[in-house]
Amino acid sequence: MKRLYGPYAYSREAIAACHWAAAVPDEALSAPPVLDPVRTRVAVIGGGYTGLNAALRLAENGVETVLLDAEFPGFGASGRNGGFCCLGGSRAPDAMLRRFGDPREVRRTERAAISHVSGLIDRLGIDADRQIHGEAIVAHSAAKARDLPRMAEEMARDHDVEPTVIAGADMDAHGMAGRWHGALSVPLGFSLHPRKYLQGLLAAFRRAGGEVYGQSPVLRIEAQDKGIALHTPRAVVTAERVVLATNGYTSEDVPDWIRARTLPAQSSVIATRPMSGEELAAQGWTTRQMAYEERRLLHYFHLTPDNRMVFGQRGGLISSAANESRIAERVRADFARAFPAWAHVERPDSWSGLVCLTASLTPYCGPVPTVPGLFTAFGYHGNGVAMGSYLGALLADLVQDRKPRSILPAAFRAEPPRFPLGRWRRAWLAAEYNWAKLTDRSS
């Protein structure tokens, strides 16, 4: 297996202090490895939100389905993200999307993805610590605050909602006291506990008759006359159809078609201890909305039901224990600057994971053209809770040669190009991060 980052990024060390594992430890998601040859109608590679949504829909439709994970279901981004189920998935501006038709097709899909997760949680009765308060986009500068009314108009047009512009002077009254210059409150989306949601999906898949194997990385995908052979370290799984759902943790050569079509980017998160009501009041940030800054090198954060602040940011180009420690300290320092009244609050938990970017700036959902019967979805640009879940369910329809029961935009069906520079393509991230540092200061 060829991967873009060093071994640390794909090890359990990166999630050794993940807050979400306190309620749902790795062992609760573990599964035995596949030891003997298996034949199945559909095999799903990857036990995150995309893979589990695909596998669950298939199993509930009576399709024999086996799920394989290199570690355990939820080991990747699905078990370690910031807990945002919100709008997003595409970073493409309308000008890029117009060649596929009406850009609002993508925006409607982003909203449908939130509804999909919400409906699934309700239907399955998953207790995922859901807090349905929408999302706030906070302005880190006066210039960004002046742009909020325009953003509100666009959001109202594209998503058929009524966002609220909050002036800087009114932030305290909305429980958003801090260094920000204003906010746009969007009544869509909710925060959740990533692992509780995933554990609920996993349990539902098993109830539907699905088989799960952990510690079973797929080292090679081989097209055969009567199916596809998936070679794992101990056994071969043969399936009529296969779903590849590994997103930012995809190997560069499994299959070769995927090479350089993804650009994994590191995201780092910390979590505080539970805070008292007095501590919350001292800072003045009491809203239960998810929040993120409107800039490239953004911070994203929200309060959990037990009053912990989960706070994360993009960044990090080198994967190692030493660099992880440096980034965690930088995130903690940024947290203290953002919330000075909480500078004394312990922040014991820190972890990191990989989000997945594409050169098209949109997700891809469809067949792998070089391997008949193989389908994939990837490239959620840091918003995989909603979009990864949604496209996973649509993959189940595609695998069965059915028309997707929900909207699948033309932009998401277009094969994403490869990034230039091949194995050195992280240079694109370095350039973007440096440009963001310059422009964020002046905007």
Image (spheres, rainbow, N blue to C red):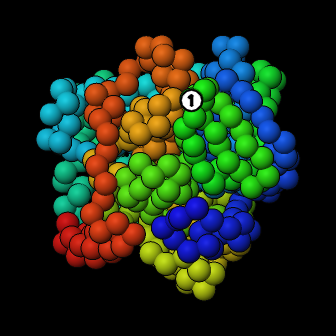
User: Is residue 76 left or right of 258 when viewed as pictured?
Assistant: right
Extreme residue in the front direction: 225
Q: Position of residue 7 (x, y in %)?
A: 62, 73
Question: Looking at the image, which is closer to me, 264 or 80?
Answer: 264
Q: Residue at x 46, y 44 (%)?
A: 378
> How many numbered marks are there?
1
Quarter of the picture holding the C terminus: bottom left
Q: Residue at x 39, y 69 (%)?
A: 423
Dot 1: few (<14), some (14–19), or many (≥20) neighbours within 10 Å? few
In the displayed structure, would residue 226 be above or below residue 377?
Answer: above
- Helix, strand or loop at label 1? It is loop
In the displayed structure, would residue 202 be above or below residue 348?
Answer: above
- Asked if residue 251 shows in the view, the reply is yes
Q: Position of residue 367 (x, y in %)?
A: 43, 32
Question: Looking at the image, which is closer to me, 202 or 135?
Answer: 202
In the displayed structure, would residue 364 be above or below residue 281?
Answer: above
Inspect the image, locate mark 1, and give the three-letter code of the amino acid beneath it. Asp
In the displayed structure, would residue 366 be above or below residue 119?
Answer: below
Mark 1 highlights which residue?
225
User: Is residue 3 left or right of 209 when viewed as pictured?
Assistant: left
Q: Residue at x 65, y 43 (%)?
A: 230
Q: Position of residue 115 (x, y in %)?
A: 50, 25
Question: Looking at the image, which is closer to me, 343 or 314?
Answer: 314
Quarter of the picture holding the N terminus: bottom right
User: Is residue 323 left or right of 431 when viewed as pictured?
Assistant: right
- Asked if residue 302 shows in the view, the reply is no
Question: Looking at the image, which is closer to me, 239 or 243?
Answer: 239
Q: Residue at x 48, y 67 (%)?
A: 4
Q: Position of residue 427 (x, y in %)?
A: 32, 74
